[in-house]
Amino acid sequence: MTNWDNARFFLAVARTGTLRGAAARLGVDQATVGRRIASLEEVLAARLFLRTPTMYVLTPAGEALISPAEAMEQAVHQIERRIVGMDDQLCGTIRVASTDSLGKRFVVPAIAKLRTAHPGIDVVCVTSPGIANLTRREADIAIRTLRPESPELIVRRLAQLESGIYASRAYLAARGEPREGSAFEGHDLVMYQQPVVPSMWDALCGEPTHRGHVSFQTSSTMMLFEAALCGLGVTELPCFRADEERELVRVMPNRSDRFDVWLVAHADLYKTARIQAFIDIVAREFDPAP
């Protein structure tokens, strides 16, 4: 491995398993990725991937190269973070990662206020149910409901929010209201896919789900809301948004849950002027005080 440019092509293919996936990740064409991998194998005099009809599979030589390539990646990202972190200008780009639900209610309004106050700051907002990797600079700052443990990250709790159990007016008119203690017997349930939120499959706000029928699954909070609004079943939703939907009714009002919202930033970027400006504004967006 002679330089970082070679390493990034190698890692992209190793992580995606295809030239097409690597090309999309790197923003180049597929032929360029193929040429770079072939060139790297020629320089190292070793075959790094076994080409199968569907994907590229690491050979033993390729597996041995993963660790040093990732070490190069981490060093490059550390350099980038430290250079960016020295910036004291209220301009440039911030990459913010969040969920679609938190993004709609809190993050986008905060971004609008940031742009009004500091028009030199541009924002890329990444919304996904997955967790952005701040160490690899997939985002500069994240607003998430899971607290990370990495010592490289600075974590701040923004708020504690409530969730409740909801169904549409149309669903309740057709099926009746679920009773507390019934474990949703005779009712359809709208759920996150099990790998996304495993605990949801055991209980909604403490009410067991084992007697209910899971009629719809999704990985998206937005789709969870839409399914509930369309009358597909009963589900657990964040109250800050569900209470604003006129077609949704909160059921089992004694059943509720609370969850924390965390702001996460890499230590190398935390003191950057534009990051601090965004943190100040988004923190006020979550603050219930007038």
Image (spheres, rainbow, N blue to C red):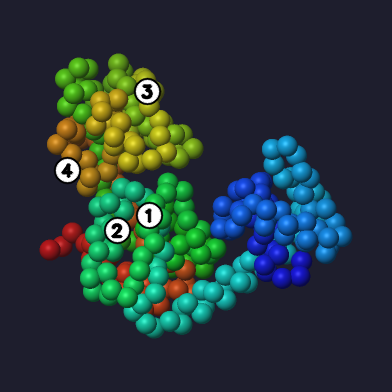
Q: Are marks 2 and 1 in contact (CB under 8 Å)?
A: yes
| Figure quadrant of the C terminus | bottom left
Label 2 CA crowd tier, 10 Å (few <14, some 14–19, many 20+):
many
Distance between the Cα atoms at labels 3 and 2? 31 Å
Q: Residue furthest right?
A: 45
Q: Secondary structure at mark 1?
A: strand
Specify which label sits upstream in the sequence, 4 or 3. 3
Q: Secondary structure at mark 2?
A: helix
* Figure check: 260 above or below 119: above
Q: Which residue is mark 1?
A: 98
Q: Are marks 3 and 2 in contact (CB under 8 Å)?
A: no
Label 3 CA crowd tier, 10 Å (few <14, some 14–19, many 20+):
some
Distance between the Cα atoms at labels 4 and 3? 24 Å
Which image quadrant is residue 244 in? top left
Distance between the Cα atoms at labels 2 and 4? 17 Å
Mark 2: which amino acid?
Answer: Val
Numbered circles on residues, count: 4
Label 4 CA crowd tier, 10 Å (few <14, some 14–19, many 20+):
few
- Give coordinates of residue 176: x percent, y percent: 19, 19
Mark 3: which amino acid?
Answer: Ser
Q: Which residue is mark 2?
A: 107
Query: Which residue sits at x=34%, y=48%?
Result: 100
Query: Which residue sits at x=25%, y=64%?
Result: 112
User: Disc number at residue 215?
Assistant: 3
User: Disc number at residue 244?
Assistant: 4
